[in-house]
Image (tube, helix red, strand yellow):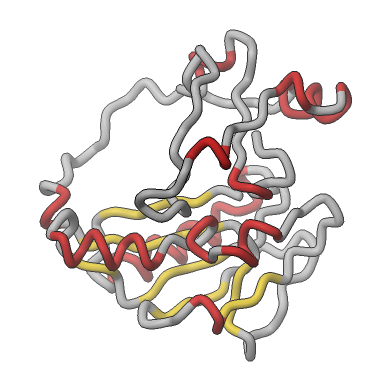
Amino acid sequence: MFRGHYGANRIDYFKSSRAQICNFPPDNSPMIVLGLRPGTNNKEHQMVRLSDLPPADAQHLLDKVCTPFNSEPFVPGPPLAERRVAIVTTAGLHRKGDTAFELGELDYRVIPGEITGDELVMSHVSTNFDRTGFQRDVNVVFPIDRLREFQRAGYIGSVARYHYALNGAGWLPQEISETAAQLSGLLKEDGVNAVLLIPV
């Protein structure tokens, strides 16, 4: 879906019937990215089109399976202003002193809620992984400042004490299920009832 994953804050839409399945806007209209600061000129961050990609890259994206979810949540959540929100990102982020991610790793790193962007590094190893957006603004892949702003404004109830990062590398659902179960337990212990998932 992403060109360079998040380079220059760009996202791609599928120009096929999958656009409806994956709930991407079928008209290819620009989207605002969470990492952008309020008042940013969105014309500088136009979204890349599938037709802009090399044919092999475009086909690779079109071949991805995107399963539709037709069911409703098992338990309705509280109003957004009462929710405790955590971030789960697949950008391969971690604190400078933590162990770097390895290719294909299924583990996670814990990121304290009071962390600042300059304390984070990225150890994603793919040569196709564009780090430009992260280097310019950590909120592109870890929108902690935006969540803090939402809390101060009363849009959300609180920001979680801990957040979590994985190394997105195309694992299959069954490969990551054990890690997902561990994270679910940790999030529950922190009283989290809403997760902002940042798939990179």
Residue lying at the far bottom in this picture: please name it.
97
Which percent across, then down, holds residue 187?
A: 34, 66
In the rendered image, the vertical position of residue 195 relative to residue 3, given as above or below: below
Left or right: 125 with respect to 5?
right
Q: Which quadrant, please, contains the N terminus?
A: top right
Closest to the observer, 27 or 172: 27
Residue sitting at x 50%, y 51%: 198
Nearer to the camera, 156 or 188: 156
Question: In the displayed structure, does residue 174 sit left or right of residue 27?
Answer: right
At x 49%, y 21%, the residue is 29
* Image quadrant assignment for residue 147: bottom left
Q: Where is residue 76 in the image (x, y as percent from the top left)?
A: 16, 40
Residue 84: give x, y in percent of width and height.
22, 62
Residue farthest toward the top in the current orientation of the protein = 17
Q: Which residue is drawn at 60% across and 36% down?
A: 11
The residue at 69%/83% (across/down) is 99
Location of residue 127 with respect to 182 vertically, above or below: above
The picture places residue 63, in percent across and down from the top left corner, at 74, 23
Q: Which of 68 and 33 is in front in this view?
A: 33
Looking at the image, residue 190 sits to the left or right of residue 95; the answer is: left
Q: How many numbered discs, if any? A: 0
